Amino acid sequence: MKMIERILMVVAMMAVMVGSSFAQGKVDEERMQRDIEVAENILSTLLKQQFDKRSFFPMEVHGNYRPGYGVTFQLPSEISNNFFVQSWASEPMTITTWGEEWEEEGPGSYSNNVGSTNGKVVYRNGSGNKASEEEIAKARANADRLKNDQQRKNDVIVNGQSRIGKARARVQNQDSIQDQSINKMLNAAKEFITDYGDLISQLAPNERIIITNRGEGNQNWFGVYNLQSRNPYLSVEGLKSDIAQFRQGKISRAQLMGKLKVINTESENELHPDLELLTSIFNRLYRSDLSKTYFTQENTYYERLKDYGVIYYLQVYSTNQDIYGDFVMPTLGNERVDPETRDKKVKEMYPVFTKSIKEDILEYGRTLKSLKDEESVIFNIKLTRCKGCAIPTWVEYAIKYSVLKDYSNGKLSKESALEKITEKKGELQ
């Protein structure tokens, strides 16, 4: 009898301990949201300080928590829309192209014969007065005569003053300004994670804080400087466990900074035949006549990122609607289903789809040839809508190119290679 009582007591104690561990691991959503909103404000302030802007300058930062992964902060697109104009507001904005000069009256965007100008265009002569039609015509004629003379381009004279070289140099300096601005954003992100990351108090040791200009899962780039020639991709990532070690004095600030994962790359416009080929392969693999789960409508595209890898973007669907408004599931033989059955089948398809696409990434990713070993192959997949189905809005799979090579050469088994594919998930629907 005593033995039974002891056993029951031990079982009860274990139940209490398990219950306690679950309680400790449960996230207080209201507290998490409050921490994120405070963190958004801090990061926004740090960005303003880096750019020497005050409260009137819009700097919206958006944070989102995903259990098991961490908090992602998306940098604001307003930086790209306003930074150049505001930075040059201290002097008249004069842009010159082959002898023509114009400046906007009041704040707004500018044009250098590529984009459009929101403000009123006013031509001015060398004295700063509004130029006459004769002066404008003369300046244009002078520019035409010197157009093919590279050495003399910066010496074009408008009514006695050499202002064209200065204006053109300002335009050509955009890349340098952009690099400086990127560094400022990276500095703000590093400072935030190092000095204020612990304010998000409920993060688990293996969860992370990510600050990026790329919208995760929505196949959208939060533009930094929206220039035709460059599309920067920025990301700074730190682990909660590293932040905790710094706070406890176990590592120095410099050591924590060294542990931060920083990505500063840009998209390439050059076409790569092997990357295009993999796009066509997945477009074909997941058409409704071959797929057994979700399907695409040949909308796969990729983005090549310098010294980082390639990201493939897919949108997959589960159903069509016929002319009568009925749900049709083409991968199940054009079966007509009611909404409840449709949602049930969508949920059943999800684990089958995720398993098959990881295997396909492994098998067909071996066709790639133009990547470096340390670069990554990433598939960002926006999933079919299914409200209340408890499947993610998107998933993302990543694998190093070196893993694909080792698998292709027989150095890795299929099971080992599949284990090296990392996964991210969006919010549940």
Image: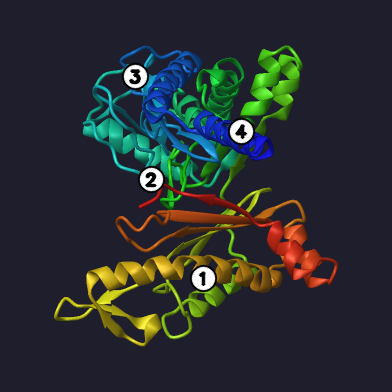
Residue 40 tag number: none
Q: Which amino acid type is shown beneath numbered disc 2? A: Val
The answer to whether the residues at label 1 and label 3 have Cβ atoms under 8 Å apart is no
Q: Which residue is mark 4?
A: 9
Q: Which amino acid type is shown beneath numbered disc 4? A: Met
Asked if 407 appears above or below 211 in the picture, the reply is below
Which tag is nearer the camera, tag 4 or tag 3? 4
Residue 352 tag number: 1
Q: Which residue is mark 2?
A: 114
- What's the residue at 43%, 86% (across, down)? 289
- What's the residue at 14%, 80% (across, down)? 324
Q: Which residue is mark 3?
A: 57
The local crowd at label 3, few if under 14, some if 14 to 19, many if 20 or more residues have their Cα within 10 Å, is: some
Asked if 233 appears above or below 405 in the picture, the reply is above
Residue in front for this viewpoint, 119 or 290: 290
Q: Which amino acid type is shown beneath numbered disc 1? A: Val
Element marked by disc 3:
loop
Which tag is nearer the camera, tag 2 or tag 3? 3
The answer to whether the residues at label 2 and label 1 have Cβ atoms under 8 Å apart is no
- What's the residue at 54%, 70% (across, down)? 279
Residue in front for this viewpoint, 339 or 217: 339
Asked if 333 appears above or below 390 in the picture, the reply is below
Q: CA distance from mark 2 to mark 3?
A: 26 Å
**Relative horizontal placement of residue 14, taking residue 370 as reference (left or right):** left
Q: CA distance from mark 4 to mark 2?
A: 79 Å
